[in-house]
Amino acid sequence: MAAHKAGLFDLRLVIAVLFAIYGVVLVVVGLGFTDESDLARADGLNINLWSGVGMLVLAALFAAWALLRPVIVPDEPADGDPVEGAQRRG
């Protein structure tokens, strides 16, 4: 029985890309568009910057998880599966 990786259809990679996009946007906003009034409202913490960094770290973790432990998808159904076996015979 042959098998292949889920590849781009792996949901973990989709989640990693989305977190990376949002993380980059927040880092850019935190570095370039945060002024003193924003920092004063957040008690001196650059929330956009730190949230963006956290999202980039999470994106890296999801991507590493997907690449290090890929989902293996069988090309053919298992012989013991009664539903798949009935569809092949009938």
Image (cartoon, rainbow, N blue to C red):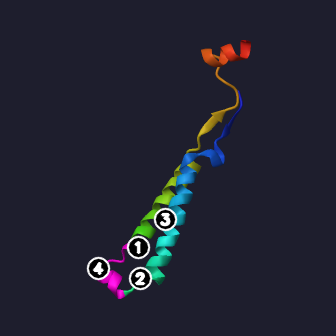
- Circle on res. 34: 2
In this view, the residue in front, 57 or 27, is 27
Q: Quadrant of the N terminus?
A: top right
Residue 88, position in %: x, y? 72, 17
Compute the Cα span from label 3 to label 4: 24 Å
Along the horizontal axis of the image, is 28 left or right of 43?
right
Q: In the rendered image, which residue does mark 4 sit on? A: 41
At 45% from the left and 83% from the top, the residue drawn is 33
In primary-sequence order, the first of circles 3 and 4 is 4
Q: In the rendered image, which residue does mark 3 sit on? A: 56
For label 1, the crowd category at 10 Å Cα-Cα, with few meaning under 14, some 14 to 19 and many 20 or more, is: many
Q: Are marks 2 and 4 in contact (CB under 8 Å)?
A: no
Compute the Cα span from label 2 to label 4: 11 Å
Q: Secondary structure at mark 4?
A: helix
Asked whether 46 falls inside the magenta stretch, the response is: yes
Compute the Cα span from label 1 to label 2: 8 Å
Q: Amino acid at mark 2?
A: Thr
Question: Mark 2 or mark 3: which is in front?
Answer: 2
- The kind of secondary structure the magenta stretch mainly shows is helix
User: Does any portion of residue 38 appear in the rendered image?
Assistant: yes
Position of residue 76 relative to residue 73, above or below, is above
In primary-sequence order, the first of circles 2 and 3 is 2
Q: In the rendered image, which residue does mark 1 sit on? A: 48
In primary-sequence order, the first of circles 1 and 4 is 4
- Please give the range of residues in magenta: 36-48
